[in-house]
Structures are given as structure tokens and as C-alpha cells.
Amino acid sequence: MPSAEIITIGTEILLGEIVDTNTRYIARNLRDLGIDLYRTVTIGDNAERIAESIREAMQRAEIIITTGGLGPTIDDPTRDAVALAVGTETEFREELWEQIVNRVARYGKEPGENQKRQAYVPKGAIALENPVGTAPCFILEFPPSNSPRRGENLLLPPQGEGWDGGVIISLPGVPREMETVLHNAVIPYLQQRFKLDEIIKVRLLRTAGIGEGDLDEKISDLEKLRNPTVGLAAHAGVVDIRLAAKAKTEAEVNQMIAEVENEIRQRLGKIIFGTDQDNLESVTLAALEKCGWQLVALESGLEGTLSKLLKKAANPSLLKVDDQNLERGELLPTLQKMRAEKNAEAALGIAFFPGEDEQIAELVLITPAGERIRTLSYGGHPQNVLRWAPNIAINILRRAALR
């Protein structure tokens, strides 16, 4: 199975002016094809540094995908950088120029002379049409690192059966353009060229009420598996367990994941609140609706985070969410009053009190089974508590509704 690396090109990304979403999108598509992604890197608009990064990647991976740097300006160096990396030159392609002229004509304009740069690709490259933009893309094939054909000039590989070299694929930086070319041309090419006959499937088990370290102790033996793989990703008050399996058929990969998932569920029980795209607040409100409880909620010192979460996931069980500025000791009586006014079965309250010496979160849960009060110390950054504290409180409510 081939391995891949992604090189994102653009000084604007390095300076933090824009966020790179292309890497995530490409990575997910490579995963679905069964391709192992081992590295991603961002390089500024410098042809020599890009070429160096490509040459390094060619020694490790069969598939190198670049995004960005295919525009018409001087600071769009990808075409020259790829040519430099393999020791060749760029060449003008008349058919690409015609595509650019036709694309610009749709806007009632004529292309400028600088846009001719986009009609150049490295010699020997396979040109790819960009049907939604003016930046043509290309694929450049190279022989394996142990081939006698690899010298200062790394091109060109044989095109017949038995070819086991690699490819450099250069895509636009504009996300919609990149996505279109990826699906229209690149994925079919990769499937055929590398005879891809395996799939990778990922499943998330979402947990709450347990820290990453404690969770690791419970399933550490499973984290040593090779296929499926098991990994942890901690968030504020929530920890995800990622299961990833590779197989030739969907039925086989589903069975592999199911066996490990069943083992994890037996060990963790109600600690698992959902899977994949499930979120804690929606699952909790659904549990309340199932047991016939209606809810009022109150928060203080959390900038309305609890309100936003519950209102976004709102269902008939949610009666009222309020945000007040409370002092220590006021949470319980205020929540009791809200519950009585709305005649609600359940009431959830959380108040955060930051301080130089200590940071305290007060939690109150009132249900038909009685009142539950907890005081938690918090040692992290005050801004992180905005999601941590609501998740802790919502999970306590979820567990109460499941009893």
C-alpha cells in the first residue's frame, strides 16, 4: 500500500493570515482510499525550499501532493519548484493556455500576459484540467529511489506494467478548485495507477466523565494493536477513542472495528456517550426526553457557553436556559426557584469563580431523585473552563437520566 505526504504551499499560511483546510480534506480522502499519510508540511512561497521538501518526500513516499502556488503571479512558485526538484524545466502547453483563455472569457475578459505562467508545467508532466478555475494542475511521475534512472535528473519512469515509482501531484490552493480536481482526476488516477483495493474506515467512540490518563489505563492493551489501531484524543471534558481499520472489503473492515468496539464498550459502559458526530449536549437532551424530564438550566461566569450548547441542541425537554452573574452560594437557591416556576423535573446549574489562588466551579443538579451539589477545583487556563465546566455538568445530567 502506498504512503503519501502533503506539502501545503503559501507564505500567507505560515503568517497565520489564512487557515489551511486543504490538508484535512485531502487527508480524509487519502484515508478512504487506504493510503497511509505519514507527514504534512507547510512551506512558504520559495521555490528552492519547496523543491528541497519535495526531494526529501520523494525518498520516503510514493505519493506527494502539493496545494497552492499555481496562480499567475511571481510569488506562485510551485511549477518551477517541482521542475527544480526533479532536475528538469517547465514547458508551455498550448492546450492549457486555451483552457485559461476560455475560462477567463466566461467573465467577459481576456487573460493578461502574466496568466501565461499558468500554462507552463514541468516537462513530461500529465496536465490536469481545472474546470472551475484558471490554474491547471499536473501529475509528474518519478521512478523508485533504487532505480538506475534516478540521477540528477529524476525523470522519467517507465509507463508500462510493473511500474513501482511515485508521483508528484500539484493542486490549486483555492479549496473548491482543489476539491473538484481531486475528485474528477486525481482519485481515479491514484486508484488505477496504484491498484488500490483496500479501504480504511474510522470510527469514533466519544466518552465523558473520565480523564485521558484514566481512560488510557483501561484500554492501553488495545492501543498496541496494529490493525485496527486505537488512539485517544482529549478535548475539554470529553475524550474520543479513535478506531481505524484497513481491509479489502467494507464488510471485513466493519467486522474488525466491531470486534474492538464491543470490547471497549464492555470495559467502559456508560462512559461512552456516543459515536462519530454525536455531541454530548444532544445525547443528554435526548436522554431527558426519553425519561420524560423537562429541564431548566442556569449558568454564571461562563460567558453564556452552557446556554449556547443547550439551545443549539434544543428539543422539547429544554424549557429555559438562563445566564446570571451570581455570587458564591447563590446558585442552589436561584436554581430551586427557576425549577419551581417552570414546574420542571430537572434543573442544572453551574457557576465558575476564577481567582488568583484558586478557581472554583460549583455544580448543582436537581432531579426527582434529589439534589446533587459538587464543588470542583480547576487548574487550567480560565478560557478553557468555558467548555470544560459545561461538559462536566452536562455529563452529570446525562448519567442521572440514564439511571
Image (cartoon, rainbow, N blue to C red):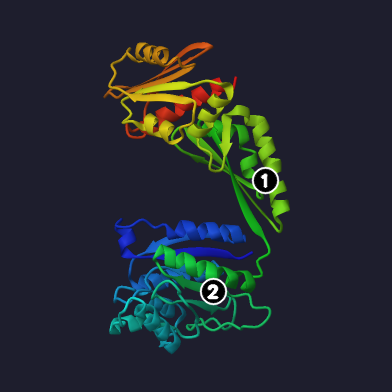
Residue that carries the numbered disc 2 in the rendered image:
167
Q: Which mark is residue 344?
A: none
Counting from the top left corner in percent of width and height, residue 233 is at: 51, 41
Residue drawn at the location 41% of the way across and 12% of the way down: 340
Q: Identify which amino acid the numbered label 1 is placed on.
A: Ile
Q: Secondary structure at mark 2?
A: strand
Q: Quadrant of the N terminus?
A: bottom right
Question: Residue sitting at 60 percent across and 66 percent down?
Answer: 2
- Which quadrant: the C terminus? top right
Q: Is residue 314 visible to the viewer in this orientation of the structure?
A: yes
Placement of 12 over or under 148, stated as above or below: above
The answer to whether residue 210 of the structure is visible from this angle is no
Q: Identify which residue, 224 or 302, lies in the foreground.
A: 302
Q: Quadrant of residue 44?
A: bottom left
Q: Is residue 235 left or right of residue 156?
A: left
Label 1 packing within 10 angstroms: few (<14), some (14-19), many (20+): many
- Secondary structure under tag 1 reads helix
Q: Examine the image and state in which quarter residue 84 appears.
A: bottom left
Q: Which residue is mark 1?
A: 257
Name the residue nearer the viewer: 186 or 74: 186
CA gap between label 2 and label 1 equals 31 Å
Given the image, on which type of amino acid does mark 2 rest? Answer: Val
Height in image: 24 above or below 314?
below
